[in-house]
Amino acid sequence: MPFRNKRVLILGAGVSGISVAHVLQQNGAQVILNDAKPLSLLKNKDISLIENCGVTLALGRQDVELLETIDYVVVSPGISIDIPLIKVAQSNGIIVMSEIEVAYRLCAVPIVAITGTNGKTTTTTLIGEIMKTAKRDVVVGGNIGLALSQEVTQVGYNGIVIAEISSFQLEGVIDFHPHISAILNITPDHIDRHHSMENYIAVKERIFANQTNDDYTVLNYDDVTVRAMNDRVPSKVFFFSRQTELLSGIFVKDGMITIKWLGEITTLCPITDIKLRGGHNIENVLAACGIAFLAGIKVVDMVQAIHNFTGIEHRIELVTSINDVAYYNDSKATNPESAIKALEAFTKNIILIAGGRDKNTDLKNFMQLVKEKVDHLILIGEATKRFRLVATEYGVKNIHDATSLADAVQLAHQLAKSPQVILLSPACASYDMFISYEDRGKIFKKLVQDLNC
């Protein structure tokens, strides 16, 4: 056991930190769980998992004394690797790693790792469903569901791990080595954390950094930034494309999902069988099927899973229809590029609710599409002022401010007439008004359902 009798300091008492603390303690480590917030401000975190297993809590402070006699520091995704305490740890020769690095060191089966700016959760979830359809012993984790370090302990000897991996998690990888990795797309996001687009791309590329020629990397041929990674990938590259018939990889030909690999051509099913809205979801299905193909899954199982897959919660999720007006929850759209994909999934006549914690990303393409497709733009949260300014610059009409999501839903309801649709697609993080994008989406759905009462 790689962590037995090691002293480990875990920074961040969120879901990831609590889970990895429990796992490491069970694997013989001496664990200290730290958070700068006191316990009274962690009331939304369930620490019952670790209360009686020997984990030491050090809450309400984050000072260098915590590093005394420590062998490893494990950083939760919400904590930047650039904070002073981590810099001191590194200068003292203490190994600093992310929770997914811990998971990798504890994992005895192959890992499939998926990253990208958008589409990670949909693609990861679909791969999991394909594996289940094929009767594979599979666990799905990482930046989705439970912490990966907790999930890898649940998989059998002949199983496989499917992991959604964020750039925050990739900051702290060392030996992390998936057998199959995938990068779905790259657009500006989290620049406030990574400081530049170049740094953001470099962090994403860590997903394949330790691979060898015995492994595979799945790349989006249609994304110029991702396609260029081909020159830096040490493993075998498998492209996917919605727009181009590839010499090798998975693509759409005559409306059919087609795989061409090692001289053989395999046809799966027509893209009309995909139940998810939007062209971006065709890309997600292509990536998922490409990964499944490389993992040895039969075509019949891929096709069945595609037929049965209706999407994930909070991603262009139909909530209900009221007076022939459909309400869609796209709370997972935490950046403009993701919101653009949601807008592209509809023809026009959209009443859009957007805003939240502003990531200060470029809004040009987003607002150009808003002008084209949106009848009314309702703004909420901290981003309201900048979003209104940029929307006005690009000629967007009918801009409304709302003081809360509840007010926004009421206003949208009052304005809407068939054939309009109401879409929550914020293009922003949720943390100004909500605990998470999931919290925001659940509250939106409750507010919409209450309209029927």
Image (spheres, rainbow, N blue to C red):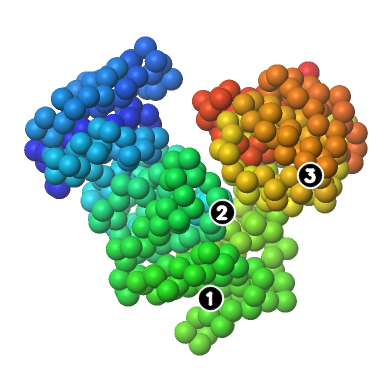
Residue 93: x percent and y percent? 14, 44
Left or right: 404 as drawn, with respect to 132: right
Tell me: residue 143, above or below residue 251.
above
Which residue corresponds to mark 1?
249
Which residue corresponds to mark 3?
394
Q: Quadrant of the C terminus?
A: top right
Which residue appears at 39% of the width and 70% of the height? Answer: 232
Tell me: residue 439, above or below residue 258.
above
Which residue corresponds to mark 2?
187
Q: Secondary structure at mark 2?
A: loop
Amino acid at the residue labelled 2: Thr
Amino acid at the residue labelled 1: Gly
Amino acid at the residue labelled 3: Tyr
Q: Nearer the viewer, mark 1 or mark 3?
A: 3
Q: Secondary structure at mark 1?
A: strand
Of callouts 1 and 3, which one flags the residue occurring earlier in the amino acid sequence? 1
Residue 253: x percent and y percent? 68, 76
Left or right: 435 as drawn, with respect to 421: left
Of callouts 3 and 2, which one flags the residue occurring earlier in the amino acid sequence? 2
Q: CA distance from mark 3 to mark 2?
A: 21 Å
